[in-house]
Amino acid sequence: MSSKQFNAGGGWVAWFVRNPVAANLLMAVILLAGVVTAFELRKEGFPSFPPDEVTVSVSYSSGSAKAAEEGVAIKIEEALQSVQGIKQITSQSSTSSVTVTIEKESDYDLDKLNQDVKIRVDAIKNLPEAAEKPVISQAERIDHAIWAQLYGDADQDVLQDLADQLRDELLADSEIKRVTTYGDRTPEITVEVSESRLQSYGLTLADVSNAINGSSLIRSGGELRSADGYLVIKADDQKYRRRDFESIVVKELTNGARVTLGDIAEVKDAYDDTPVLSRFNGEPSIALKVEMVGDSDIMKVSERAEQITEAFRDTLPEGVSTAAWYDKSSAIADRLNLMYKNSLQGILLVLVLLALFLNFRVALWVAAGIPISIAGAVFLMGDGLSAMTINSLTTFGFIMALGIVVDDAVVIGESIHTEQSQRGASVASTIRGVQRVLVPATFGVLTTIVAFAGLQLVEGKMGQLFAQFGIVVIFCLVFSLIESKLILPAHLAHVREKKQQGRKHFAARWLEAVQEKVRLGLERFTHRYYRRALHVLLEYRYATLAAMLALFIVVAGLIPSGAVRFVFFPNVPGDVINVQLTMQDDVGYGLTQREALRIEQAAQDLNAELIESRRMETPIIANLQVRVASETDVSITAELAEQNQRALTIDEVAALWQKKVGAVEGARAVKFITAFDGPEDLRVELASNDNETLTLANDRLLAALQEYAGVENMESTLKVGQPQITLSLTDSGRALGLTTAQLSAQVQQNFQGYEAQSFQRGKDEVKVKIRYPSSDRSHVDDLVNARVRTDDGRVLPLLSVAKLESSYVANEITRVDRKQVAVVTADVDKNITSPQEILTALQNGELRKLQLDYPGLTVSFGGEATEQAETSASFIKAFALALFGIYALLAIPLRSYGQPLIIMMAIPFGVVGAILGHWMVGISMSLLSLFGVLALSGVVVNDSLLIVAEFNEGRKSGMAVKEAVKHACASRLRAILLTSSTTFVGLAPLIYETSVQAQFLIPAAVALGYGILFATVITLVLIPVLLAISEDMRSLFGGRRENMSDRGADSSALTAPDAVI
């Protein structure tokens, strides 16, 4: 087409109307691009936080958390003091290691921080000699994918060998990058020799070690060079098995007899004595955790891991099996299927609703804008553009967009339908129908985009995470603009002609009859009821306004009154029950193991009881894993049967299980966790330079928390419960030439073990340790009766040269930003109270008293409270900027400063609707509710804009104020009802969804859906009243203002030719 033809046609809209082939090609390109991109998008569940930490780990078996703090942690902290980009430094010092975690500023590059930290840490030269080299690691995106469990009635070495084979097969697959093994133990050769046997042969542990190292080794003997070349000489007599070590000669007697290691010691080829317990469904096991790393696709990772695990089962010996369980991809697939189902239901509901009010073909083409917009949004999510993933939040964005994206299409389709009904179907009437509402429809979409763009300004980890669905909605709206302005009119231009061809089918005649009844009913309602009601409302406009304001105040009061509660981050139901058991520091491994097995048995008993009492066909707990990795820490994971196979919720099962377990002996904390990980409900950090002050304040805070209903599982990092015995030399010991270093070294070697050597056996590094038998090093009496050697060879009782003092010390010290802190955390039952309510009560009560009683004490907060404060502050800023953007976008086409304010009065009443919606549905408001309210602010103004635009057109044509108001409201009623109802029905399947997968998304859907419904009703009442009052104000302050911009907002700006597009 020539440029003359294009200009004569009136611009892009007219050009596409006259060229349906171009419109169809554009539609095909968008759909094809979206479909192709959809197959390439990576899938994940709940999107993970971007990595923002660098960790420095130092292995240091000092036996004292205090020594580790002073010798390692403080030195690393000081070295990092001037490094840029650090938000917070946290260190944890224990008896065996130090971990320093460096959190970056939100806008700082993690790679750069990692490099800077490495340079500073590597430059530290005065770390203790016993400390190993610091390991600096950068946080990665790691998420659980699936468990591959190997279990059965077999020895540890059999299970371990099979687990190694399975792990190798898993890692050989290109999709699987990381497999972590739990329940395996480190092979170790232990030489256990009693003190009496050593003394009988005149030996020491050092003598035994020297004998082993002299007989078990691989050592180079140099090279033999000649004219013909050279040979490498090597001594190779490394011992690898128990019998090899037993044959080592440790001493030759005067009679020529040889004393071997097997003669004086028990040599064991087994595993180290680290407390390890791993069970699965009541049997010994080894667990392999397959994890996503970086940009892996969880669906592919889990699928391949399950296939490999099932295939490996066929190669196993009798009595051993495998299980692939807690497949997180299946939960994600369920969520995505739920979203797809809700999307399809929403599209069908929108189509049915449109078909009731409009020509069926018009309704069909208007609804076709939904898949076109979604396809365009998927295209923009591709790796080459925004690089987003398909996850719970982005899919929710598509559901939220279902009703919104057709708003402008509904307005334009309804306008075209009206023009064609009055003037006949033609290209000209189609173009006139578009031009009539082009600008308000366009700017209506732009206000919605501005509102959703405001979500991107919300700070905090949770805010940034949940803002993802806003990006998806913006992408959909961009393509809805393209579709409604360029593609839709081209299709609607030929609707009537196609409809008139041939004889009508019965279904078409039935639909037309229904449409006619709906049309007549709407006209009857408009003229008989709505216009009459408007007449009364306009007569009593000030009373109406007062009533609206009173309604606003009453509903807004539902929140402070507690009728509608606010919970910043609601508990999101998880897929499994995690039991976290932490035992007191002074309990032994035996009690920890017994309690872990008792919890396991309680789960099995619960299964049996529920099968009998509720006649369930399958156990409600389908899989049960028990892991004990230390003397004090137990982790138990229970995977439940599918939701449709059980009548109980995950919270109900956890409550029954916890009741059956009852009190746990020796426990510091027992948590039955059923929700996804989020910010800690309650986190209070106490800091002081005085340890006694810190201890007293910590104990008082823990006691205060116990007084609050709904607060449970209180814990503190200040754990002064580790029994300790302190050795100190006596004067007689010093007189014998002993030093404290010699004393501690001998005691450590005798009880902890003397590492003689290590060697490689296959994939394992095997250590050879020499120590007393376990029966001689298990009790305090063994220490009391211990012997030490002096330099002259004498063997003396320990108590003759040293004093022993018992005490309790901290086995872990936590520091934040170079200060020792006590971090107190607690869970909050959000059905009873909220973290913010508890925190407010603490600030006004015990925390204030603590700071008065201990002047050097500082208090800070973390967890949900900090996240809420950061997110809320930025939300207010984002909301204000969004409102200004909406105001600007309304003022530009209206050419008015005052009328945008009238239009925006719909926003606070949309908020009222959102609050009422939460009250009616019976849920608390949350962070997602606020996001729904922010999005709502851009949607609710669209209906008001249509009324004001039509009002200005009526005033320009000479109508009186009241008549113009009535005409504007009546003429735009159908479009307003359609846009609002399509938005609500698009969200309705999600709002009333009962599955646990959708529960955390429902608050945002309720805020937007009910907010729009309520705001629509208010718009049809309040906006006409405000328009009339604004004219009263003009008359009151001077009739000369009638000719100024506010008088009318120039309607020509709202019906401008489509050349502006």
Image (cartoon, rainbow, N blue to C red):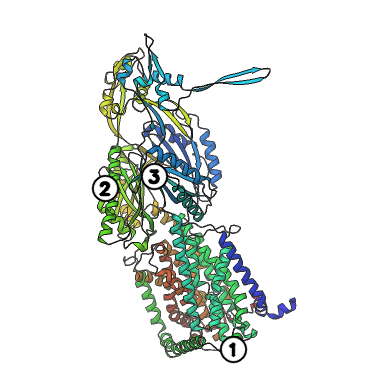
Q: Residue 627: in sight, yes or no?
A: no
Residue at image mark 3 = 318
Where does the N terminus fall, quadrant-wise?
A: bottom right
The relative height of residue 341 versus residue 409 in the rendered view (above or below) is above
Callout 3 secondary element = loop
Residue at image mark 2 = 703
Callout 1 secondary element = loop
Q: Residue at x 61, y 65 (%)?
A: 33
Q: Earlier in the sequence, mark 2 or mark 3?
A: 3
Q: Residue at x 52, y 66 (%)?
A: 473
Residue at image mark 1 = 502
Distance from the alpha carbon under mark 1 to that under mark 3: 73 Å
Picture coordinates of residue 264 (x, y %)?
34, 20
Picture coordinates of residue 616 (x, y %)?
30, 61
The relative height of residue 44 versus residue 87 in the rendered view (above or below) is below
- Looking at the image, is mark 2 or mark 3 nearer the viewer? 3
Distance from the alpha carbon under mark 2 to that under mark 3: 54 Å
Q: Earlier in the sequence, mark 1 or mark 2?
A: 1
Q: Are marks 1 and 2 in contact (CB under 8 Å)?
A: no
Foreground pick, 146 / 447: 146
